[in-house]
Image: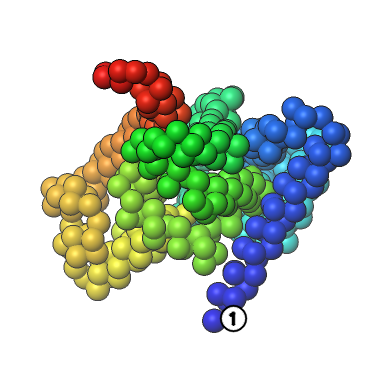
Amino acid sequence: MTRLLGHFVVAVIWALAALFALMLAIALLFILDLPFFRILGPIMLIPVGFIVIQLIGSIRRRREAVAMAYIRQAVRLNLPLAPMVRAAAKAEGRVLRRRLNQLADHLEAGCDLDRALTQSLPEASARTVGMMGAAQRLGRLPQALDRLLLTQQRAIGQDRGAGFFYKAYPLTLLMVVAWVVNLLMVFVMPKFKQIMRDFRVPLPTVTQAVIDFFGESELWLALVGLLALAVLGSVLLNAINPRWRRTSFWGAFIDAVAWRLPLWHGLERDRGMADLCALLDDALRAGVPLPEALGEATQLRLNVVLRRRVERWAQFVAEGQPPHEAARRAGLPALVGGLLVTAQAGHNATDVFRFLQRYYDAKFSRALFLLRGAAVPATALAMGIVVAMVALSLFHPIVALIQAAQWPPLRL
């Protein structure tokens, strides 16, 4: 109960911090006393906020990639890790130099790599820390570093403007539409209602429906504002502390919700299964028994539902059950158990896990590409429907007044 209360207090503090920052920016725009900024200022804060957060996230991701590159170079050249990191720190800027020196201090003190990264490099994600720790204990650190650097380079290459666009465009468009519709409901629709009442002409059905939905209550506008605050706050939190979901109650709650949503479920499952199968492939090739490898796999940054299933899989295998039967009982995808049936020896199992890693990694990449490609058309279609309904609600009263003013009445 105390832990839950602590997570709730942290979430409230972050929400209040985001709200205070937005209120301060809006007050600054009003102090400037420019009509243009008074009207569009709150909407412009959304893309500006995303630009700042995107810049922070890009800088931190590059720091993580540089630190991982130095560690990989030391491991590949079979050099002492701590002296190599300390020597590399002299060529970096002030912030990264301090991070690398702290990393070298923790390594010289005898800390494992994952613990040293956790304490000295806050830019390192939970996925990076988990894979580094498990790979080091299994003796497959070079292979894990190669995969991580390849993923980071791909993410940095795709992040040049695309990340900002896909995050900022839907929310900005939603805020603009909500702002315009609210102005129409406040200044335009009451005049229409008064004019129609004076001419004794009933309001058209579409106009009345739009007024009932948007004009009677400000709840929808408050929900849009809360959604904008929640998205901005979560993106900022991910940029500042990428490991917050590792041990957070809210992170476990988000994982549970994501596992049950149609599209998000596939992304969480495929990304986690790719990391899991890659680790098991490396462990078996190093001669590590499957039960021990599964025990290390539970330390990866997986979806909380998937991690519990991996823990059950490890428990069933430790009890002596065949790997394919244990995977089926643990609730893992049927493909895993079906392919493990064909694995009669250890080297065959490594081929199975390597195939599964490539299969799930390809599925994750295709799904992510499909979602990014569909984000803009889906957003434009949804907002277009709202704009079309509002436009019809404005034109129908004008047509109704024209018909009532003509004699004989005009029939369309």
Residue 135 in the image: above or below residue 95? below
Colour scheme employed for the rendering of this structure: rainbow
In this orientation, does residue 57 appear? Answer: yes
Q: To which quarter of the image does residue 401 belong?
A: top left
Residue 203 in the image: above or below residue 20? above
Residue 252 x %, y %: 46, 63
Residue 119 in the image: above or below residue 213? below
Q: Mark 1 packing: few (<14 Cα in 10 Å), some, or many (20+)?
A: few
Q: To which quarter of the image does residue 366 belong?
A: top left
Per the image, the residue denoted by label 1 is: 2
Where's the C terminus, which quadrant?
Answer: top left
Q: Secondary structure under badge 1?
A: helix
In the rendered image, the residue lying farthest to the bottom is: 1
In the rendered image, the residue lying farthest to the front is: 407
Where's the N terminus, which quadrant?
Answer: bottom right
Lateral position of residue 401 relative to residue 100, left or right: left
Residue 221 x %, y %: 55, 47
Q: To which quarter of the image does residue 359 belong?
A: top left
Please give the name of the residue rendered at 31% of the width and 63% of the height, measured from the top-left corner: 309
Q: Looking at the image, which is closer to me, 146 or 138?
A: 146
Lateral position of residue 60 relative to residue 153, left or right: right
Please give the name of the residue rendered at 59% of the width and 76% of the height, measured from the top-left corner: 5
In this orientation, does residue 152 appear? Answer: no
Q: Amino acid at mark 1?
A: Thr
Please give the name of the residue rendered at 37% of the width and 18% of the height, measured from the top-left corner: 406
